[in-house]
Image (tube, helix red, strand yellow):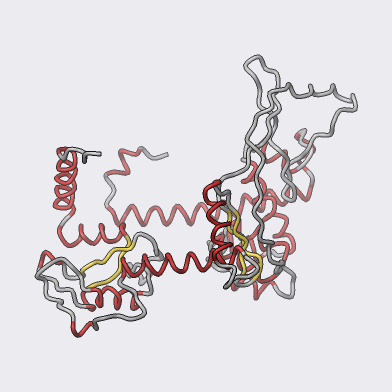
Amino acid sequence: MRDTHELKSIPDDDLLRRLEELARQSRRVEADLVAHIGEVDSRRLYAREAAPSMFAYCTETLHLSEAEAYLRIAAARASREHPMLLTMLADGRLHLTAIAKLAPHLTPDNRDTILARALHKSKREIEELVAELAPRSDAPAVMRKLPARRVDTQPAPSPSPAGGGGAPVLELRPDAVAPVGPPLRTDGSAVRRVACPSRSATVEPLAPSRYKVQFTASAELHDKLERLQALMRSSVPDGDLATLIEQAVTEKLERLEARRFARTKAPRKAVSASHISPRTRHIPAAVRRAVYERDGGRCRYADEQGRRCTARQGLEFHHRRPFGHGGDHSVANVSLACRCHNAHLAEVDYGREAIARHRRSETRHLERTPPASP
């Protein structure tokens, strides 16, 4: 284990090189770990260690988390039929989640084609590929009231002694997840809790170009959706929620993109009629529109290997020749950049210390500025 103080003295290029090498080593070790798990599983050696299953051995003896154990066991079992998975895991072409999600759909006949499409894909992209391989029907559009949040503090039944005919122990396996054990009071007695509904939204691919979107709405949003259904009965007679939301989001998106990137169906000025000289910091609407279309609504920064940034959020307009150095507002001189790369390029153009001084100055100015009156 390296001291963090030692790492601070390593030059930037060397630090990046070392990190890439450590990632390669980690993937090789990961593949070896999965291979060993697969062999121990096939020999059922976990039984010698007082573990009733490979999953229990991984969590109780190797002290892996439930998710870590699930992914590695799933990958190990899949690699028995498809040995190339270990090689692809070791060289970074596939990650554990990809293997676990693709494994049920792989056969000796289709695996070469599927794995070629899965190279270096993210979890979301893998889920979309799985949805294409095994499409599911559309999710029904529903609005329903969730049960109120509550906690039942009644003591949970005490576990029966061994051999007493108590309830069977549920095992968390790669194909089934058991509930977490009941929490304990300060005196050690168990408390039965009723799970609260999750508030996080989920987006799940069902089939090519079809997604299931699920979230918990407030009473206010529920009321607004019902009002929208009533107002749009003429254009959406069945009141389909997906259609209503798509039209509402499209309208909001058009307004925001018009304000931020000057996107409009009927532009009033062309780039040729715009003033692009660096007299003010204002970038003409026609230039912003042309830059957004050219860059495809995505950060344009590319590294030395030609890899382009994938960010589509928090986009800003960056002057390749800085405005402070006389750069104009021409389409050729302006590009989209995410906040991270806009700040990075500013440090390249003006120097890291100059940007740091500017940020400190802005912070002091904000601290001295009195809050606005209510």
Seen from the viewer's position, the closer of residues 84 and 111 is 111
| Residue name at image x 38 percent, y 53 percent | 18
Residue 312, quarter of the rendered image = bottom left
Relative horizontal placement of residue 360, taking residue 98 as reference (left or right): left
**As displayed, is residue 108 above or below residue 51?**
below
Q: Which image quarter is the N terminus in?
A: top left
Work out whether residue 124 can be spotted: yes
Q: Position of residue 350 (x, y in %)?
A: 15, 59
Q: Position of residue 163 (x, y in %)?
A: 89, 25
Relative horizontal placement of residue 125, taking residue 108 as reference (left or right): left
Q: Position of residue 170 (x, y in %)?
A: 78, 38
Query: Residue furthest toward the bottom?
Result: 272
Q: Position of residue 277 (x, y in %)?
A: 11, 75
| Residue name at image x 34 percent, y 67 percent | 299
Q: Which image quarter is the C terminus in?
A: top left
- Total labels drawn: 0
Relative horizontal placement of residue 72, taking residue 199 as reference (left or right): right
Seen from the viewer's position, the closer of residues 217 and 335 is 217
